[in-house]
């Protein structure tokens, strides 16, 4: 069987794959600066309601569209209901007060800095943090498709990484040609590349194997097999592609997916409106993905981030402006879920209309969060993490359960 | 009226019309009239191993176009190479019509800010791609690509995108086939490089505790000249950085005067004595410290070896024979870094002749060689640029100063996109790209071939297939390849030719050159 043959060609010896090989990290980027105060409303802090006369999510128990109570301090936006079981069962965690030391409030600058995993006062880095991590893996550890971005363009975070592919649907990961031609074409390619006793030949065979695996996942007959019930949205469709790729067991390590539209300066809406619709998409998609992945032996962890949070107070257009800290989300079997990690970082607002940014403080450098994710999801050792974030010296923050496999 | 005069008048009338109409189709038609058309009879080299003339074409150009092999045979490889080393002798009107249509690329650094980033990036890439495909000064374009990698500028950093057009014109293209030290000197004060590697912020002011910014100095030694094992020390990097202090560029466009070039600020310069790689640079040199620095590093023996090694890896083999690298380094030293002399040594060597088919094509070369081989007509519109991006080499976007990698492993992960491009091109399904495949097929059939070399191997059932294979690969198929293709040749349907061509373009043999 070609797949076993190509695997044997890859392994230098009879060891199992390196630790962390069976794990995939999916990074969901909420573009525009997501108001995580709405996803995770702090109903226990009265200042939240005072600052948001029209935008505050009603306290738990106040009507049918009120926050879902998590504890004395936090609730969930009602449209996050799909993820409530994951939270209660300990698979979903929030990490409060994440951000970067960039006060520009510029989407462009902050997205770049977040995705590069850099800092203005730190050592220069190049490309994206995920790209740098992939470069620490040896050729042996990288399959034919180690990293994908679902969409039209490669995100900054994957830049500089080997073999990161961009496509919109799985149909792109296939040989183009009429259906009648495909068997003879693949057979010819297989013979041609098998005759090569070189890296090129090996990659050719692996690529054909990739097509074969992906072809067995065509949407036509998989709807009955699919465990999760994916809602109708491009975001959910993207997550479904990622799930299919993970199930195809081709060694996918990193997948990136964007959910845009979070820059809600005008009429943000509390439990209705444009932001609520996005929240429902986010939660519905992630919940379906999670259910889908339960039946898959390969571990998938999802990290949800944004370039900055938004201000605590609402503006005159019943929206919010750019802030700083936000609550990141971690979803997976090994996540220390069912809690909100990190202190409640609300900055005191002395003047209700300050000139500068006023939102949640940044208590936790996003790079530290990324480092911990790499360490746990991929068992990346200290050297590798230091290569990705030079000079950072991150402290573990207990965001994952079980033994840390990263050496310190 | 002489043919050339007639052609000149035709061209000027048509250029005027094209300028008014701005029409891709008109430019394509003119190109055909100016020599881009497929010849009526196409010689294909069909020996058992790659034809030496084909090999020279496939290394010293981006890949042979229909007619190139016959022209090279008539001229002889030596004379052909000499022409390529003197690009000014080669008329490039047809390419200019296609490629010199991008307004933004003629602008000085300060003025380029008038354009949007996306427009500049787009025009830079299209210009580079079109010149690679259509220029007759192919070796020149290859060296432009080589030095663009060597002196990498990432358009994504800061304002580099506004500054790269000038760098492409004044640094890379001006010196690509010139003298190495002049290339480095121009690069050191290129606004794009000053911003990319931070030398614009490299200052040591009197009365301040400034430390020099060593970023450019380090890459100058590590990547651009001596090489990482070239034998310099951290102290040398610091001394180089001291030499470079004061050279800056008004990236913020704060001052009204002269925003178009780098300038030297004496009050930012560390004017003390420096000791660099064993050379003493006396105090008070001011801006001349940079000239001394360039002189010293470019004449260092490690630089000759480093550049010779890189060129051999680009043009000969991934692990080039030591003797060739050393002889090439010797030529570099003897000629004081004259690039044409260095290239002559490489292309005329026995090691070069022995290296047929050993190099993996990087994505740019894969795309361009395929387009050239089928005489494709394109104006580098988004579908083609997207394909190049999918393959991982979107041009001018490499994030690190070492430029797009030369090694194989980096590029093998995008085979699936190469295959799809191959089938799209062969099937006429690559939007905005057309290719005269039938014309080429009949021209191949019309040719009588070389004496002795066109003997077809026994067992060859499909002559058209063999001719296409030879046209694309420079030899006839091996026994293994014939076996692999055999089932295809038996088919009789309409799509057979497109399938065969697509498969040859997707085959391992076409991934190499």
Image: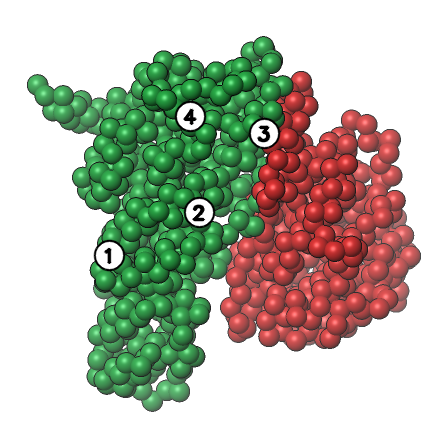
The chain coloured green in the image: B
Residue A157: quadrant of the picture: bottom right
The chain coloured red in the image: A
Question: Which chain is mark 1 on?
Answer: B
Does label 4 or label 1 sit earlier along the sequence?
4
Does label 2 or label 1 sit earlier along the sequence?
1
Give the residue at x 27% y 46%. B106
Q: Are marks 2 and 1 in contact (CB under 8 Å)?
A: no
Q: Which residue is labeled 3 in the image?
A: B480
Q: Are marks 2 and 4 in contact (CB under 8 Å)?
A: no
Rounded to the nearest angstrom, the CA distance separating label 1 from label 3 is 44 Å
Looking at the picture, how far across and down is residue A87, in whole percent?
87, 57
Does label 2 or label 3 sit earlier along the sequence?
2
* Side of B112 where B320 appears, left or right: right
Looking at the picture, how far across and down is residue A186, in whole percent?
65, 28
In the displayed structure, would residue A404 be above or below residue A41? Answer: below
Does label 1 or label 3 sit earlier along the sequence?
1
Rounded to the nearest angstrom, the CA distance separating label 2 from label 3 is 36 Å
The numbered dot on residue B395 is 2
Does label 4 or label 3 sit earlier along the sequence?
4
The one of A74 and B86 positioned closer to us in this rendering: B86
Does label 2 or label 4 sit earlier along the sequence?
4
Give the residue at x 51% y 23%. B501
Rounded to the nearest angstrom, the CA distance separating label 4 from label 1 is 36 Å
Rounded to the nearest angstrom, the CA distance separating label 2 from label 1 is 26 Å
Give the residue at x 70% y 47%. A9
């Amino acid at each position: 069987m070609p797949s076993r043959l190509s695997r044997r060609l890859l392994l230098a010896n009879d060891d199992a794959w390196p630790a962390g090989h069976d794990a995939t990290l999916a990074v969901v980027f909420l573009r525009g600066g997501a108001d995580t105060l709405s996803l995770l409303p702090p109903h226990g802090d009265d200042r939240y309601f005072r600052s948001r006369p029209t935008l505050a999510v009603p306290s738990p128990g106040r009507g049918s569209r009120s926050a879902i109570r998590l504890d004395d301090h936090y609730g969930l936006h009602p449209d996050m209901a799909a993820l409530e079981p994951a939270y209660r069962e300990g698979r979903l965690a929030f990490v409060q007060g994440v951000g970067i030391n960039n006060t520009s409030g510029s989407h462009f600058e902050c997205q770049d800095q977040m995705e590069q995993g850099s800092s203005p006062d730190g050592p220069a880095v190049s490309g994206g943090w995920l790209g740098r991590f992939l470069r620490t893996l040896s050729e042996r550890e990288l399959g034919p498709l180690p990293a994908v971005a679902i969409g039209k363009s490669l995100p900054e975070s994957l830049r500089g990484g080997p073999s990161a592919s961009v496509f919109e649907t799985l149909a792109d990961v296939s040989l183009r040609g009429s259906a009648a031609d495909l068997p003879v074409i693949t057979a010819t390619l297989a013979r041609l590349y098998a005759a090569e006793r070189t890296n090129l030949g090996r990659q050719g065979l692996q690529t054909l194997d990739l097509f074969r695996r992906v072809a067995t996942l065509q949407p036509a007959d998989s709807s009955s097999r699919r465990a999760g019930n994916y809602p109708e949205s491009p975001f959910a469709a993207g997550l479904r592609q990622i799930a299919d790729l993970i199930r195809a067991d081709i060694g996918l390590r990193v997948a990136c997916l964007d959910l845009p539209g979070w820059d809600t300066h005008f009429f943000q809406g509390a439990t209705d409106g444009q932001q609520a619709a996005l929240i429902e998409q986010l939660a519905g998609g992630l919940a379906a993905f999670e259910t889908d992945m339960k039946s898959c032996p390969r571990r998938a962890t999802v990290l949800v981030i944004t370039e900055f949070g938004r201000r605590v107070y609402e503006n005159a257009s019943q929206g919010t402006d750019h802030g700083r800290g936000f609550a990141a989300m971690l979803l997976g079997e090994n996540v220390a879920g069912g809690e909100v990690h990190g202190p409640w970082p609300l900055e005191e607002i002395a003047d209700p209309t300050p000139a500068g940014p006023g939102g949640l403080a940044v208590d936790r450098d996003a790079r530290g969060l990324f480092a911990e994710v790499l360490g746990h999801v991929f068992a990346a050792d200290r050297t590798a993490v230091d290569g990705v974030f030079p000079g950072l010296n991150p402290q573990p923050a207990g965001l994952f359960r079980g033994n840390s496999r990263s050496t310190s | 009226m002489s043919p050339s005069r007639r052609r000149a008048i035709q061209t000027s009338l048509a250029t005027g019309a094209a300028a008014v109409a701005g029409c891709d189709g008109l430019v394509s038609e003119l190109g055909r009239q100016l020599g881009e058309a497929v010849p009526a009879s196409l010689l294909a080299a069909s020996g058992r191993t790659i034809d030496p003339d084909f090999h020279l074409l496939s290394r010293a150009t981006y890949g042979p176009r229909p007619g190139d092999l016959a022209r090279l045979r008539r001229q002889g490889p030596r004379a052909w190479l000499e022409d390529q080393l003197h690009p000014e002798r080669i008329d490039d009107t047809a390419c200019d019509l296609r490629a010199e249509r991008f307004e933004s690329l003629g602008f000085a650094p300060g003025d380029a800010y008038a354009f949007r980033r996306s427009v500049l990036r787009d025009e830079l890439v299209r210009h580079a791609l079109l010149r690679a495909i259509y220029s007759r000064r192919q070796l020149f374009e290859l060296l432009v690509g080589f030095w663009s990698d060597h002196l990498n500028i990432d358009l994504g950093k800061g304002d580099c995108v506004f500054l790269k057009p000038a760098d492409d014109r004044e640094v890379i293209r001006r010196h690509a086939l010139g003298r190495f030290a002049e290339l480095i000197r121009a690069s050191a004060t290129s606004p794009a490089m000053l911003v990319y590697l931070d030398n614009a912020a490299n200052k040591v002011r009197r009365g301040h505790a400034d430390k020099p910014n060593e970023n450019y100095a380090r890459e100058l030694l590590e990547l651009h000249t001596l090489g990482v094992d070239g034998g310099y020390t951290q102290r040398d990097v610091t001394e180089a950085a001291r030499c470079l202090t004061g050279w800056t560029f008004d990236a913020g466009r704060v001052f009204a005067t002269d925003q178009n070039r780098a300038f030297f600020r004496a009050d930012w310069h560390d004017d003390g004595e420096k000791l660099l790689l064993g050379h003493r640079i006396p105090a008070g040199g001011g801006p001349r410290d940079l000239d001394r620095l360039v002189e010293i590093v470019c004449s260092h023996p490690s630089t000759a070896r480093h550049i010779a090694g890189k060129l051999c890896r680009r043009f000969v083999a991934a692990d080039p024979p030591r003797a060739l690298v050393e002889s090439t380094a010797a030529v570099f030293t003897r000629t004081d870094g004259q690039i044409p002399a260095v290239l002559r040594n490489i292309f005329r060597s026995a090691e070069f002749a022995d290296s047929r088919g050993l190099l993996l094509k990087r994505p740019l070369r894969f795309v361009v060689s395929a387009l050239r081989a089928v005489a494709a007509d394109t104006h580098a519109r988004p579908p083609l640029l997207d394909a190049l991006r999918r393959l991982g080499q979107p041009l001018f976007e490499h994030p690190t100063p070492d430029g797009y990698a030369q090694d194989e492993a980096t590029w093998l992960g995008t085979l699936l996109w190469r295959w799809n491009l191959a089938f799209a091109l062969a099937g006429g399904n690559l939007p905005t790209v057309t290719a005269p495949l039938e014309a080429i097929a009949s021209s191949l059939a019309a040719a009588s071939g070389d004496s002795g070399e066109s003997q077809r191997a026994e067992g060859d059932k499909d002559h058209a297939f063999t001719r296409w294979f030879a046209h694309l690969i420079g030899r006839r198929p091996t026994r293994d390849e014939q076996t692999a293709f055999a089932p295809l040749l038996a088919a009789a349907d309409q799509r057979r030719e497109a399938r065969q061509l697509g498969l040859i373009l997707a085959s391992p043999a076409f991934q190499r050159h």
